[in-house]
Image: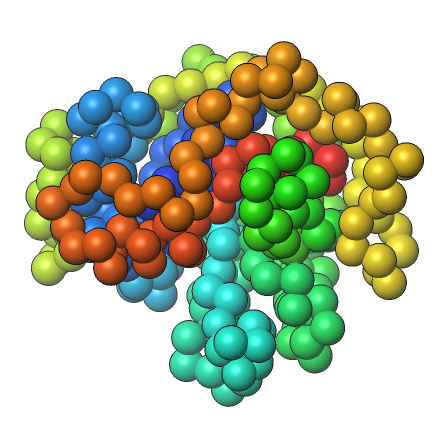
């Protein structure tokens, strides 16, 4: 599937997309350091090339998002968790860092078939969760959720996260068909801004611009999410642990490609930038597994 990534960070979620066989057609990230990391990963060949929009998502919605209509099958967004977390004082709507309104605006403008959303589990107990589900419903999306931790997949750390999959309720075709990226493997996502330079200036904002490609099938499209909103995760006996894992996991090898959460790469940027990017990042195998379970 063709993915538009919001709040991309340093690209942990994009690694999940690779596991799922998706291809990214654009990434939006306000942090310049993270954008530099993404561009470097493209140069190194770890990520395919796609436009990297170094701007506030609200600016993106106004200036760029309309150009993505008809080009995107899934929007991924780990919108900022501070408004809902204990550490962030849980101010919700009153928190200036609340980017949910901009996130739902992006969904309304681009109109993807799906959205994969990520946040902290504390959001479930926050009154603002009703706003999020209401906004999705009013925008024509059905939603289901699950709390999934890295530890459940064998990681040495807990890192619980809330995952929400929203699907277009008005789609005329079966969602299971749309969840398979081979439908679009021949439709290349055109760059939003022209040129082949690693970066360029667009109205004062940096766009790391390239092209995109990808496409393989996604398994387990018949998996169902939770119907009971009082519990955020399935019990172990309800799922076959081997089925939740990607092929490399079943052979015991997937964690070899997962960096330790505390690891710091030898980059030019400051240690603080690197640690912040790691702390805000997603564990790729968890994001991919959440998608498999909820679709």
Q: Outermost residue toward the front? A: 156
Q: Could you say where residue 131 lies in the image, as x and y percent from the top left?
A: 66, 73
The residue located at (16%, 55%) in the rendering is 270
The colour scheme used to paint the residues is: rainbow
Q: Could you say where residue 273 lies in the image, as x and y percent from the top left?
A: 24, 56
Q: Is residue 64 visible?
A: no
Q: Quadrant of the C terminus?
A: top right
Of the pair 258 and 20, the residue shown nearer to us: 258
Of the pair 273 and 220, the residue shown nearer to us: 273
Q: Is residue 56 visible?
A: yes
Of the pair 26 and 227, the residue shown nearer to us: 227
The residue located at (76%, 23%) in the rendering is 243
Above/below status of 151 relative to 162? above
- Residue 182, quarter of the rendered image: top right
Q: Could you say where residue 92 lies in the image, as x and y percent from the top left?
A: 56, 80
Above/below status of 290 relative to 241? below
Left or right, residue 66 beside residue 178: left
Left or right, residue 235 beside residue 14: right
The residue located at (37%, 34%) in the rendering is 25
Left or right, residue 291 beside residue 146: left
The residue located at (61%, 50%) in the rendering is 158
């Amino acid at each position: 599937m063709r993915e538009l990534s919001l709040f991309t960070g340093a690209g942990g979620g994009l690694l999940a997309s690779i596991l799922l066989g998706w291809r990214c057609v654009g990434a939006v990230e306000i942090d310049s350091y993270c954008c530099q990391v993404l561009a470097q990963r493209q140069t190194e060949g770890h990520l395919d090339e796609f436009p990297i929009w170094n701007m506030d998502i609200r600016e993106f919605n106004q200036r760029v998002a309309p150009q993505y209509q008809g080009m995107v099958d899934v929007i991924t967004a780990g919108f900022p968790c501070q408004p809902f977390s204990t550490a962030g004082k849980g101010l919700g709507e009153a928190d200036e860092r609340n980017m949910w309104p901009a996130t739902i605006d992006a969904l309304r403008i681009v109109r993807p078939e799906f959205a994969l959303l990520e946040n902290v589990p504390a959001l479930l107990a926050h009154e603002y969760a009703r706003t999020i589900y209401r906004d999705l419903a009013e925008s024509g999306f059905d939603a289901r959720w699950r709390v999934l931790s890295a530890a459940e997949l064998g990681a040495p750390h807990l890192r619980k996260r809330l995952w929400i999959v929203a699907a277009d309720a008005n789609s005329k075709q079966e969602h299971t068909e749309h969840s398979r990226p081979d439908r679009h493997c021949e439709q290349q996502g055109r760059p939003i801004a022209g040129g082949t330079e690693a970066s360029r200036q667009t109205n004062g904002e940096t766009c790391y611009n390239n092209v995109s490609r990808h496409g393989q099938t996604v398994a387990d499209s018949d998996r169902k999410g939770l119907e009971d909103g009082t519990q955020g995760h399935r019990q172990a006996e309800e799922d076959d642990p081997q089925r939740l894992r990607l092929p490399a996991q079943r052979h015991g090898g997937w964690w070899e490609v997962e960096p330790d959460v505390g690891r710091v790469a030898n980059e030019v940027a400051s240690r603080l930038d690197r640690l912040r990017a790691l702390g805000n990042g997603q564990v790729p195998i968890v994001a991919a597994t959440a998608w498999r379970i909820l679709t």
